[in-house]
Image (cartoon, rainbow, N blue to C red):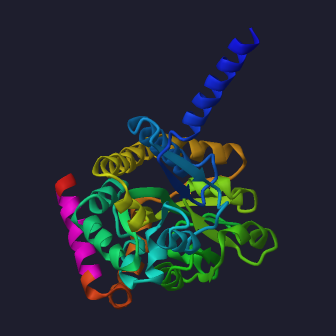
Amino acid sequence: MKKRFSICLAAASILMAGTALAADVTLKVAHGAPESNHMHKAWQKFEEIVEKRTNGDIEVEIYPAGQLGEGRELLEFVQMGEIDLNAEAVGVLSGWDDIFAATELPYTFASREVARKVFLGEYGDWLGEKMEPIGLKSMGWFEIGIRQLTNSRGPVYTPADVEGLKLRTMQVDAHITAWSKLGANPMPMASGEVYSALQQGVIDAQENPLSNIRSMRTHEVNKYISLTNHVYSAYTVVMNPAKYESLSAEQQKIVSDAVIEASEYQQDLIKAEEPELVDWFRAQGNEVNELTPEQMAQFQSKIKELKPEFQKLVGEEAYGKLMAAVAKAEAELK
């Protein structure tokens, strides 16, 4: 009996060892969004697809909520091969080349549908090619949402309501230039500092997609949420080129397809979530206001005056290509 038990135990040990060695490749993913955010859920969908279709030959490890860093730091980790995949705001890449700031220009896209068509088309392919010289393999496009404005002073309906607001922005020149034009006092600041800065009155306002406003809890210290829809915030999914090349052709296709399917899954989550978030904020006591087309046009008109500055900022080629792509997308969606 003892002998039989020993044989069974040995067999179980071999099976366990085999299971531990089953994954031939590990893909390490890191991002800054909390686990409740649709960004993290998109990466979980990616993990599910990759591991299932490779029969466990590829294992995906996800490090969310800035566990390994945020923003440019994570992109640099991808370049160095410290992590394998990341999704980051396209504008953050402008630290390497100004052309990546073009899509961060406010009121560039009339709708999410137009923006998605641009990123999934020739313009997105062109941006992907521009990532190669800086050591990043473009894999596709996620998003964090459409950016909205919150503040502690009152509802924002027109540019006059923005005048004098001490406003936290990302460290993106296009954002800083635009808010300055609208009369605000933009103050670039790390996302982790925003809540306390609002609480202490260092700043009056900030801007983020609705999902971020909830996860950052800025609604607790900013009563007013104005749906200004000023920037569609696309995130580029990038991979370490050497890691990508180390995969077999079949594995490369599985990983690439998984990014596309995870992106589509994320879109479904976002579209279902946004109306619910507006109701949720109102239930928390926040005042949420929408802008009429006429009020939105006032913001758009002010931003259009910045065209020469934006062209200079991102370069004639990048600006021209983007505007052409937007016009084409709008025409195809009519």
Q: Is residue 176 visible?
A: yes
> Eyeballing the image, is 145 above or below 90?
above
Residue at the right extreme, as displayed: 200
User: Viewer-proximal residue, 180 or 10?
Assistant: 10
Q: Is residue 203 left or right of residue 93?
A: right
Q: Residue at x 71, y 14 (%)?
A: 3
> Eyeballing the image, is 332 above or below 169?
above
Residue 329 drawn in magenta: yes
User: Viewer-proximal residue, 213 or 181?
Assistant: 213
Percent across and percent down for residue 53 are 38, 37
Q: Residue at x 35, y 81 (%)?
A: 99
Q: Main secondary structure of the magenta part?
A: helix
Q: Residue at x 69, y 42 (%)?
A: 283
Image: magenta residue range: 318-331
Percent across and percent down for residue 152 are 71, 67
Q: Is residue 73 left or right of residue 143?
A: right
The quadrant where residue 276 appears: top right
